[in-house]
Image (cartoon, rainbow, N blue to C red):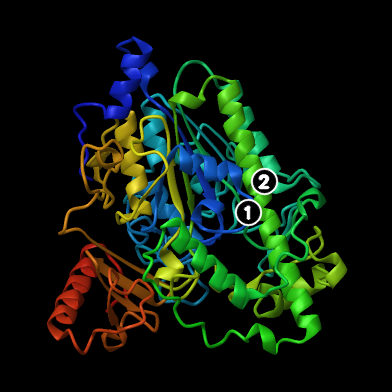
């Protein structure tokens, strides 16, 4: 972590001058972190999309949008990296959802399924420094009390402990968990049946901030479960009927053209080939098209609803006099989601017993709809792949940093940043140093780097040319240095299946340069091996 710990950043200096006081506690900014679940790269209006998102667009207008922000390929590893500033293996989330029955990974470092003792959670450091720390929404970093938000530094919390839930009740979504578990301040609580998740989480966060207001700064983590499946939405927002009758092939092209028009991808960019498994829209029957269109209508309505509640949060901050001294960060946790649990094992039988997906019931609390690969490919239009893939389609996500002190309001930045850069950024904003040891126990240094100098115009880059990043998840891997990237979606233990791309020239990863650039390929593989060894990324049973 390369941050200055002997002085506050320009955000804090500026706030001190405006406040006319010397107390760093009063001067420190509030931080609001908003995470959308499975939101696609092209979904927002400010990212070239057609969905009505005026509140998120307003955040972009008062801040900067990034085109090269990278997460993990799925939600739990991204959250572990977000709260630790470290690699998902170092942070304890080497696979989605933790250990699997009978797997060689069980009990191995890096596969704990909760935040490991090799890191110190960023919220705990903020709380120890005097910040109020609040969270509402999805946790997905351990179900036990000792792994809950309350144990990781959150003063107040209301959290779904699993990775997904019904948006209106606690009926489970997976055969192994027939009930969704919720925790309030570390204690199991029931879900208030009938309340829509996005509204509930917004209400909780506003309540926490309002009741805790005492002059000290706060860190609030809005971990929404929208627009993650099941696609369920209040009737008042079901206003996209007929908007997607053109089909997913046309939407994909429209989204891509929107990105180009907004300046988010180069004008010379070409739409990458469609995924071979996607059936062309014109080959669908009339009934199939009707059902598919309805899926996307519901998804768009959920994004619209999410935007509305983010607007409620912002309005509350303005009405309470907190907005001007609040840094707001918005992100999605991975690429657009392609899963279809309702029709595929191992959870299909359980879901089909408990949910009704008939056309007239789609979108209700008793339906379980996903929008699938075809619509997900529209959500990742400029890239190859989607959620769970280490290609850009799985790890490139929308990212907005908004606030008074952010320089270049309304601008678009193509600077390479990752989800690991957020924790060091927040700690530097708060003037908090990351420790080397806790209770005589060594702590792994953060791999992310603070973005503050870049955001305030004191630096032209977040990372220098020597910076490298790598990741492995569920047998897929990538390693990146500068514009060069090797990626493997068949298994990281088989080095012969890694492919080489230059992302500056080929962001869609369409042209494998492994054969034409043998020396570069050799260097990248050597870098991956060293990175893997250094950070404990296992690629097979030990010994």
Q: Quadrant of the N terminus?
A: top left
Identify the residue at image location x=73%, y=46%: 191
364 up-or-down from 312: above or below: below
Q: Residues within 10 Å of mark 2 (few under 14, many from 20)?
A: many
Q: Residue furthest right?
A: 360
Residue 383 in view of the camera: yes
Instruction: Choose between 294 and 495: the one closer to the eye.
Output: 294
Secondary structure type for disc 1? loop
Q: Is residue 347 left or right of residue 421?
A: right
Q: Residues within 10 Å of mark 1 (few under 14, many from 20)?
A: many
Using residue 78 as the reference point, say whether residue 39 is left or right of it: right
- Number of marks in the image? 2
Residue 437: percent from left, percent from top:
24, 41
Earlier in the chain: of badge 1 and badge 2, it is: 2
Q: Is residue 178 visible?
A: no
- The residue tagged 2 is 198
Residue occupied by mark 1: 226
Q: Residue at x 78, y 55 (%)?
A: 238
Front residue of 528/155: it is 528
Residue 400: x, y in percent? 44, 46
Outermost residue, left side = 519
Seen in the image, is 188 located left or right of residue 47?
right
Q: Where does the image place residue 443, in percent across and percent down from the top left? A: 26, 47
> In the rendered view of the protein, which quadrant contains the C terminus?
bottom left
Q: Quadrant of residue 190?
A: top right
The quarter of the displayed image where residue 315 is located: top right
Q: CA distance from mark 1 to mark 2?
A: 7 Å
Callout 1 touching callout 2 (CB < 8 Å): yes
Task: Name the one closer to the observer, 433 or 98.
Answer: 433
Which element is circle 2 on? Answer: helix
Residue 269 at x, y percent in the picture: 38, 71
The residue lying toward the viewer, choosing from 161 and 378, is: 378
């Amino acid at each position: 972590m390369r941050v200055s710990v002997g002085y506050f950043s320009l955000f804090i200096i500026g706030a001190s001058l405006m406040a006319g006081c010397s107390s760093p506690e009063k001067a420190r900014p509030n931080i609001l972190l908003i995470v959308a679940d499975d939101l696609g790269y092209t979904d927002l209006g400010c990212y070239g999309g057609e969905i009505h998102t005026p509140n998120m667009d307003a955040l972009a207008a008062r801040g900067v949008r990034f085109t090269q922000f990278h997460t993990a390929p799925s939600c739990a590893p991204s959250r572990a990296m977000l709260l630790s500033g470290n690699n998902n293996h170092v942070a304890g989330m080497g696979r989605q959802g933790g250990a699997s029955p009978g797997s060689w990974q069980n009990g191995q470092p890096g596969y704990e399924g909760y935040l490991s003792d090799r890191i110190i959670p960023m919220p705990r450091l903020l709380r120890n420094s005097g910040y109020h720390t609040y969270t509402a929404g999805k946790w997905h970093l351990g179900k036990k009390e000792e792994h809950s938000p309350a144990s990781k530094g959150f003063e107040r919390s209301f959290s779904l402990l699993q990775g997904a839930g019904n948006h209106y009740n606690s009926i489970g979504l997976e055969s192994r968990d027939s009930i969704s578990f919720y925790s309030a301040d570390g204690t199991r609580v029931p879900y208030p049946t009938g309340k829509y998740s996005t509204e509930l989480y917004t209400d909780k966060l506003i309540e926490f901030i309002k009741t805790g207001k005492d002059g000290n700064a706060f860190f609030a983590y809005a971990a929404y479960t929208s627009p993650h499946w099941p696609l369920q939405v209040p009737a008042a927002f079901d206003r996209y009927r007929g908007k997607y009758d053109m089909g997913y092939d046309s939407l994909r092209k429209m989204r891509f053209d929107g990105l180009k028009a907004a300046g988010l991808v180069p004008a010379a960019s070409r739409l990458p080939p469609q995924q071979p498994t996607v059936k062309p829209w014109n080959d669908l029957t009339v009934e199939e098209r009707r059902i598919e269109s309805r899926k996307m209508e519901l998804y768009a309505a959920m994004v619209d609803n999410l935007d509305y509640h983010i607007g409620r949060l912002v309005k509350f901050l303005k009405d309470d006099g907190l907005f001007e001294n609040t840094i707001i960060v918005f992100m999605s946790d991975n690429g657009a989601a392609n899963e279809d649990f309702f029709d595929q094992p191992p959870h299909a039988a359980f879901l089909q017993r408990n949910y009704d997906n008939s056309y007239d019931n789609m979108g209700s609390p008793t339906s379980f709809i996903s929008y699938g690969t075809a619509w997900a490919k529209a959500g990742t239009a400029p890239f190859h792949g989607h959620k769970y893939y280490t290609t850009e389609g799985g790890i490139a996500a929308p990212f907005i940093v908004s606030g008074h002190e952010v320089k270049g309001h309304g601008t678009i930045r193509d600077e390479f940043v990752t989800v690991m850069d957020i924790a060091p950024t927040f700690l530097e904003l708060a003037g908090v140093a990351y420790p080397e040891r806790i209770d005589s126990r060594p702590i792994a240094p953060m791999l992310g780097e603070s973005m503050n100098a870049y955001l305030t115009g004191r630096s032209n880059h977040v990372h220098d040319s020597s910076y490298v990043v790598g990741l492995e998840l569920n047998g897929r891997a990538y390693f990146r240095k500068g514009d060069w990237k090797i990626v493997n979606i068949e298994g990281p233990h088989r080095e012969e299946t890694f492919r080489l791309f230059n992302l500056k020239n080929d962001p869609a990863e369409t042209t494998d340069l492994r054969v034409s650039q043998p020396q570069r390929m050799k260097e990248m593989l050597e870098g991956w091996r060293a990175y893997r060894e250094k950070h404990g990324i296992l690629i097979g049973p030990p010994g």
